Amino acid sequence: MPAPQSAAAPVSVPERLKRIEAELYAGGSHAKDDIRELTDILAANPGIAEAHMLLAVAYRSVGNPEMVGEARAELRQALDLKPDLLPARLFLAQVYLETSRPDRAREELEAALARAPNQPQFLILLGEAERQLGNPAKAIEISRGLLQSDPKLAQAHYYLGLALLDLKQRDEGIRELELVIQSGVGDPNVFLNLGGAYLDAGRVDQALATLEQGARIAPTVLDLRIQLARAYRMKGSLQQAEQQLAVVTKTGFSKQPTVALQQLQTSYHLELGLIRLQQNQFAQAASAFQAALAMDPNSGPAHRYMAEVLMHQGLYSRALEQAVQADKLGSPLPAAQRKELETKLGIKKTGGLE
């Protein structure tokens, strides 16, 4: 008679966490299952800091912007339980940067560097936090210092490129972003920012190639679609530009009210308005620019293009109001249009619209 088989030994919590960690860091293809398992683990023992951290990583892996708040809360809980859990500080800093809170990101990174001085990953993100805080020169100093030690740090090249673009050193910024893509990095944000820099430089064909490559890698990233629409519009391919915006409309915007979402929607309405303006569909263009201003009343470009539309419609007094706002916000009308508006309204030139 065969001996009875013994039941398999139960898997310990540390072993389960190690397996979940490996799955999440390998791409998070089972993130929803991991969320359920981590929730069960924490229900039994809510004091496991690593489980809170991994739950935050799983929330982010799902890719739902509406779960960012949950991820942030889990990371805070992890650090309350274990302040020396440095990966949690790194993830929390990333979340703050992604949600336009560079001040909080800098706090977390400085706290981490106090525990682990000169750690490259923390310094890389600190440079980006400084850039987002309006200190691009400081960001450049941090990134270049890192690259002196390790020239192959692609993320440092990326954030250096963004800081150079902020300082209007476009050619140098483009070279840094090109190095990142040449290194094989597939982050859609690199393609988005390089494509935008190419467009600002008037290099439309290079922008199209870069943005199309990015859209193939990340077809649901709406910023890439909006920039592609801009590139096609600048190329004169208005039908293809509209097709890109149609993808945005079909996909839909997240319902989570964030600064990034507001910027995305403003960009969408601006691009749609510019297409309609180029098609001489002035009423539709005005509607789109008004939608952009509803999202961001301080959008200088929206005020500027609204002024152009109103001029086309013969509404010169209203156009003047928009032009004055655009001027104050750093997006003045081109000289020829300013002169035309002054002439129509009988304004004597005083050095600027007032």
Image (cartoon, rainbow, N blue to C red):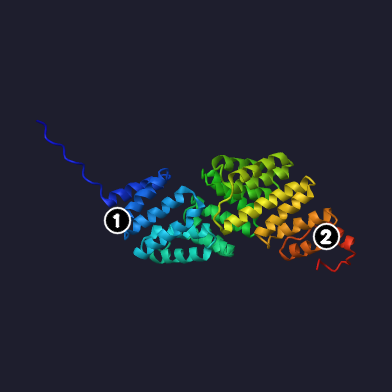
Question: Measuring 55% from the left and 43% from the top, which residue is drawn there?
Answer: 218
Disc 1 versus disc 2: nearer the observer: 1
Q: Mark yes or no: residue 82 visible.
A: no
Amino acid carrying mark 1 in the image:
Ala
SS for callout 2:
helix
Front residue of 293 and 232: 293
Q: Which numbered dot is residue 294?
A: none
Front residue of 37 and 123: 37
Q: Residues within 10 Å of mark 1 (few under 14, many from 20)?
A: few
Amino acid carrying mark 2 in the image:
Arg
Q: Which numbered dot is residue 338?
A: 2
Question: Measuring 71% from the left and 39% from the top, which residue is drawn there?
Answer: 239
**Left-right relation of 122 to 266:** left
SS for callout 1:
helix
- Sequence-wise, the earlier of marks 1 and 2 is 1
Q: Residues within 10 Å of mark 2 (few under 14, many from 20)?
A: some
**Left-right relation of 67 to 216:** left
Q: Which residue is mark 1?
A: 44
